[in-house]
Image (spheres, rainbow, N blue to C red):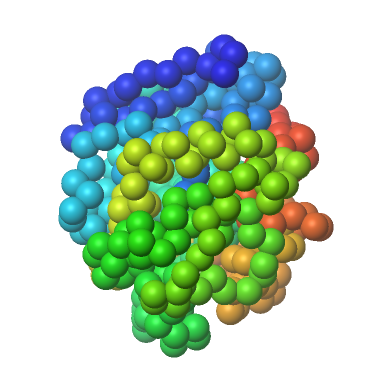
């Protein structure tokens, strides 16, 4: 892609692949589940054109970032991943506060970056993942199991190797990716054990915002690396819950803007709307300046609605 530079940063036991473009204040983009740095392609070009230094890594276990022990899910806790981000910032922006823009699981990581190291973050734009305050009674996986049962995707992900075998034997890489990247269903995602799925090798089901070239980039990378890294984030949720007990109820003290689509399945998870709109979100994030729910948008809004998201990011960051 024109003008984008790729480089490897060796730190924290990893070789972290980043892409970057532009000069000026640094904006760090963190991708979510089953995407890569590539999900920020529109924002990287736009923010660079506006006088910012846009940087997007492949997170631990993803894409061209190497060195993560994929056979050990305990190395994928929030402390490990936030540690990667801090170590990366120590190399590319030492002693500097940066802007952070993050989506989905990347936003979950960024919320904890803000919580643990607010000294490194100037302002934050969260897409598609509100601050998930720690429930002292149960971790997220156990809660979802109660709501949705054994076939719910987060629950199915827990046994090492199980979902990887399911993808290889019954689902296929492209179908698995489409199940998440292209879905506009607001209900829960299930993977009944042993169910058969038809692999769709054409681009006929791709929406206008996801070209065949875009989808093939994801499919090619995940064919090469597999899905163990991304799934390990879910396998580490229980351990993360134990390790983050000291921060139960803690406030995030970073200026924040939050954007979510009204067709986002996260928006429709139990308790999400109430948390976002009934005051608890603002209570835990006192510097939350704006909450935007975009009509007709699903989970991957930075790709689906790039022009609107670019404007929201730029307008917010201009304040600082």
Q: Quadrant of residue 16?
A: top left
In x, y percent, where is residue 209?
72, 41
Q: Can residue 271 be spotted in the picture?
A: yes
Where residue 154 sits in the image (x, y, percent)? 42, 70
Q: Residue 100's x, y, as percent?
A: 52, 38
Residue 276 in the image: state x and y as whole percent.
Answer: 65, 67
Residue at the image position 18 percent from the left and 53 percent from the top: 71
- In this picture, is 152 found above or below 34? below
Name the one closer to the observer, 158 or 278: 158
Frontmost residue, 208 versus 90: 208
Residue, x 26% and y 34% (percent of image)?
66
The answer to whether residue 253 is visible is no
Q: Nearer the viewer, residue 140 or 34?
A: 34
275 or 60: nearer the viewer: 60
* Residue under the point 81% across and 57% down: 295
- The quarter of the image holding the C terminus is top right
Most extreme residue toward the right is 295
- Residue at 64% of width from left, 59% of height from top? 183
Q: Quadrant of the N terminus?
A: top right
Number of on-image labels = 0
């Amino acid at each position: 892609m024109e003008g984008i530079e790729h480089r490897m940063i060796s730190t924290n036991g990893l070789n972290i692949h980043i892409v970057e473009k532009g000069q000026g204040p640094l904006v760090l983009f963190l991708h979510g589940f089953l995407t890569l740095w590539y999900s920020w392609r529109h924002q990287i070009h736009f923010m660079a054109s506006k006088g910012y230094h846009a940087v997007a890594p492949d997170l631990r276990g993803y894409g061209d970032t190497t060195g993560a022990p994929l056979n050990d899910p305990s190395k994928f806790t929030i402390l490990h991943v936030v540690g990667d981000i801090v170590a990366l910032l120590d190399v590319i922006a030492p002693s500097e506060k940066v802007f952070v823009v993050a989506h989905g699981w990347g936003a979950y990581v960024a919320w904890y970056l803000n919580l643990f190291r607010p000294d490194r973050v100037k302002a934050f734009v969260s897409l598609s993942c509100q601050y998930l305050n720690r429930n002292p009674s149960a971790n997220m996986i156990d809660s979802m199991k109660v709501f949705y049962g054994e076939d719910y995707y987060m629950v199915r992900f827990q046994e090492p190797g199980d979902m990887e075998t399911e993808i290889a034997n019954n689902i296929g890489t492209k179908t698995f990716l489409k199940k998440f990247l292209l879905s506009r269903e607001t209900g829960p995602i299930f993977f009944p054990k042993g169910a058969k799925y038809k692999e769709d090798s054409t681009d006929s089901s791709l929406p206008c915002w996801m070209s065949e070239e875009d989808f093939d980039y994801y499919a090619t990378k995940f064919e090469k690396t597999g899905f163990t890294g991304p799934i390990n984030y879910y396998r580490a949720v229980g351990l993360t819950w134990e390790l983050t007990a000291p921060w139960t109820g803690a406030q995030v003290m970073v200026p924040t803007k939050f954007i979510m689509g009204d067709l986002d399945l996260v928006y429709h998870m139990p308790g999400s709307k109430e948390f976002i709109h009934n005051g608890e979100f603002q209570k835990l994030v006192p510097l939350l300046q704006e909450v935007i729910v975009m009509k007709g948008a699903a989970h991957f809004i930075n790709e689906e609605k790039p022009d609107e998201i670019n404007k929201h990011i730029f307008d917010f960051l201009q304040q600082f």
